[in-house]
Amino acid sequence: MADYKAPLRDMRFVLNEVFEVSRLWATLPELSEAVDAETVEAILEEAGKVTSRSVAPLSRAADEEGCHWNDTAVTTPAGFVQAYKTYAEGGWVGVGGNPEFGGMGMPKAVSAQVEEMVNSSSLAFGLYPMLTSGACVSINTHASEELKATYLPNMYAGIWAGSMCLTEAHAGTDLGIIRTKAEPQVDGAYKISGTKIFITGGEHDLTENIIHLVLAKLPDAPAGPKGISLFLVPKFLVNGDGSLGARNTLSCGSIEHKMGIQASATCVMNFDGAEGYLIGEPNKGLAAMFTMMNYERLGVGIQGLASGERSYQNAIEYARDRLQSRAPTGAQSKDTIADPIIVHPDVRRMLLTMKALNEGGRAFSTYVAMQLDTAKYSEDAQVRERADALVALLTPVAKAFLTDMGLDTTVHGQQVFGGHGYIREWGQEQLVRDVRITQIYEGTNGIQALDLMGRKVVGSGGAYYKLFSEEVRQFIAASDASLGEFTKPLGAAVTTLDELTDWVLDRARSNPNEIGAASVEYLHVFGYVAYAYMWAMSAKAALGKEAQEDFYASKLGTARFYFARLLPRIQSLAASVKAGSESLYLLDASQF
């Protein structure tokens, strides 16, 4: 496996040249005081160093070793404890955290780049700080000042970790039927009892304490999702002076044996009357949990991007070195027995597909992160409302499309290696195994597509979608003729998506099956069009600079490949949507 190198040049390009993020931050007073170009540059440089030097070298061996469970205790692979200590001491767990409690206070557009780097280095390792950061978002937004002051500083510092305990054996997506109970106590605390499964980082040896956010139901809770409350349940209770007290009555019953992310502890967690504290209002736990969901789901999308980036770095190094056959046009490397495989059209197709999807995905994830920043920090109510709507619309696309393309990209990278891609020591098959979970957790991609189609598009009567469509059209209208080779196909693609949206809205009025039948293909059309928008903006930032640096020539060439070879996929996807739901119901259940 090639040594991981953080793609800092492209990250700088996206932040500074495509989106000119400093302009956005200047309009957000809280960020304008906290962020400047020098700080961001230092963060990118240092994050690149710590992830490539301390984390990435562990990935291969950690996958082989995995986590160990013994009598409720979980041990992470060799090297993880020291690497996590190094990562935490750099402040990286709290890079986006509230400065009042020790976080760096960086915008999501910056922390998204850090997330990509750590997940490219090791997806299994990156899950531990990701869950902690996500838990901190909910605590910071909804918990009492006392809970914030008690828990956030040590969580941001990486001394304590966090986990998110939602799923139960009988209740996955349908959280309204969870059975975990919360019994009120006279001192204001609660006794939490129940079992949660698939809990990432529920138990490990990386930190002194683990702070679990647990969904449970109060005795008088209404039925369904309206009866869910959110509780903070620490592994060790915390004394009044901030020191650790007694072990709480919770434990890890086992860890899962998984397809991938072997170095991430996926736990069954048992809560046996464990002491917990209410976060937010009673029966409003789902809303409190979903505060972190937009961040977590974008974070999972970034995991897909990160896996694709690591796969591409491996594949491009291999393609330049591996000698096999001659180019169709004749020998290109006449001093060797064969040409490097990068000369072959199909290898170039795979490499360019990977590059186009990775760079388009990096721009798109940053774009969504900027909407999160705007929604959080803007002092203009109308601006916040628009950003909130775009976040709602784009989050399922970011989670599902980035991870679907992440799997495609890691498979392409494996294919470039041929037989070696199937052999473990080359590293490519690990990336395929690891990234596969990203399409499943934090809501499967089918659920994300249904959320996009049903709640965000049909549920808003198309209003959320129009915000995106109108923005793209405004960009096209404001672009000059020199960008026409990109804006013309972009305009045609938006028209296709407009028409497809109207078609589903119309059909859904008389047949509710059309929403679910259309959802996955619709999300993919949306994703390809969104990436086309990103590539058009990237081309605008690069155009005319080709002679200055090879980077810009490469950027334009990749943009042209995207529009020529990948964007046309929307035509077959749109045709599938317009085939309707009827063919899905031609068989009775017994006929499958």
Image (tube, helix red, strand yellow):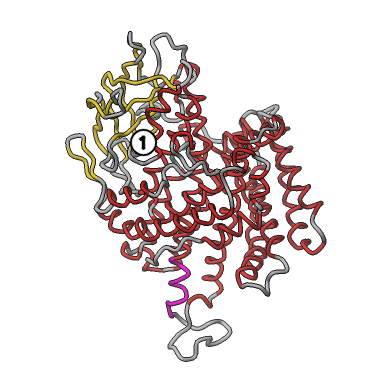
124 shown above or below 488: above
421 is within the stretch colored magenta: no
In percent of width and height, residue 409 lies at: 50, 58
- The residue carrying mark 1 is 154
**Residue found at the far bottom of this picture:** 335
* Residue appearing at x 46%, y 26% in the figure: 174
In percent of width and height, residue 461 lies at: 71, 30
In percent of width and height, residue 145 lies at: 45, 23
Pick whichever, 293 or 140, lies toward us. 140
Res. 392 visible in picture: no
Q: Is the magenta stretch mostly helix, strand or loop?
A: helix
Question: From the viewer's perspective, is 152 left or right of 246?
Answer: right
In percent of width and height, residue 387 lies at: 66, 36
The range drawn in magenta is 314-323
417 shown above or below 381: below
Res. 4 visible in picture: yes
* Residue appearing at x 69%, y 27% in the figure: 510
Pick whichever, 152 or 571, lies toward us. 152
- Locate residue 471: give its quadrant: top right
